[in-house]
Amino acid sequence: MMIISSGPRRVLIAVVSVVAALVPFYSAHAEISAWADNEGGRMRLVALAPDAAGKIRAALQIEPKPGWITYWKEPGGNGIPPQITVAAESGVTLDAIAYPVPKHYFKGGIEDIAYDAPVALPLSLTAAGKGPVAIDASAFIGICKDICIPFQANFQLKLGPAIQSHPEEEAILQAADASLPKPPSQDFDVTAHAMSPDRKTLSLTLALPGGAAGEGKDAPDIIVTGPSGHAFTKQIGGKRDGATFKVDVSIGKLPKDYDISGKRWSVLVIDGERAMETTLAFQ
């Protein structure tokens, strides 16, 4: 093994563990793979047979061990975001990965946007043909404590007929969907946004939900994701006025010659027990 420095947290390249994890994990129960194990946790693939349109509901289940974390789509200052690929020759394509609401915290000067408990990432896939479906997927994640261990595993599933009942898989997928942030609504939304001419500040106006969380003095947690690899979380001068919250978000260094015109960024807002995610379109 060798240790590579990566900011305040070291990254451990566990060569033996990663190579071992590349062995495909089959399953006697075709819709749930066996667990792939790592020093800091485990993961497996869950899927249901395609519907009449070829759409497949699936999820990557990740269970960090106590004291360990795994990362959201933009991990913060350090960390490895999840990467999932499906072999093209399998006739199955990965359309989208969804991300449950993460935790956002600082520890010892390190900012993490991550999960410190079991999590399932919902996956949307499409099967090209009408016959039996075999998923050949590879997952690559980071599992971190004092060190970060890259964790990779291959999963192969042969999906049975859609007419069969699979209550365990259904329960896992329903719970995964329920853990996602909600789309914007009348009482919880970004009602206005504007980027400063120097591209250093993003001004946001939010409608926040009522109840105890909405009436409190604490600022909501706001995570803005711009170009790939960039997350902006530093709030400047936030002010609540009833259900309205106005704040500036500091925009860190963007890629050289980055043109924001026509781009769409995402923003996740966590206010108490509620979370909302939406997109910001720039003219």
Image (cartoon, rainbow, N blue to C red):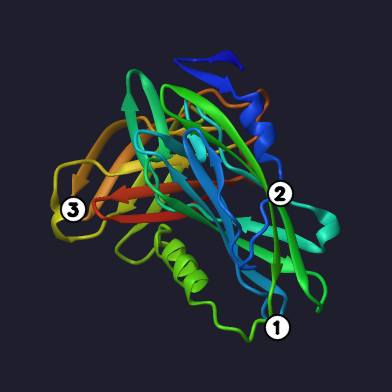
Instruction: Name the quarter where the N terminus is drawn.
Output: top right
Seen as rendered, the residue at the extreme right is: 89
Q: Which residue is found at the position 41% from the left and 49% from the top? A: 118
Amino acid beneath label 2: Pro
Question: Would residue 271 be seen by someone viewing this image from the given angle?
Answer: yes
Q: Which residue is found at the position 66% from the left and 23% from the top? A: 256
Amino acid beneath label 1: Ala
Q: Which residue is disc 3 drawn over?
A: 213
Nearest to the observer: residue 106 or residue 167: 167
Mark 2 neighbour class, 10 Å CA radius: few under 14, some 14 to 19, many 20 or more: some
Seen as rendered, the residue at the extreme front is: 28
Mark 1 neighbour class, 10 Å CA radius: few under 14, some 14 to 19, many 20 or more: few
N-terminal-most mark, 2 or 3: 2
How far across and how far down the image is residue 62, in percent? 49, 48
Nearer mark to the viewer, of 3 and 1:
1
Nearest to the observer: residue 148 or residue 96: 148
Q: Which residue is disc 1 drawn over?
A: 52
Q: Which residue is disc 2 drawn over?
A: 24
Secondary element type, mark 2: loop
Marks 2 and 1, Cα distance to the nearest angstrom? Answer: 28 Å
Marks 3 and 1, Cα distance to the nearest angstrom? Answer: 42 Å
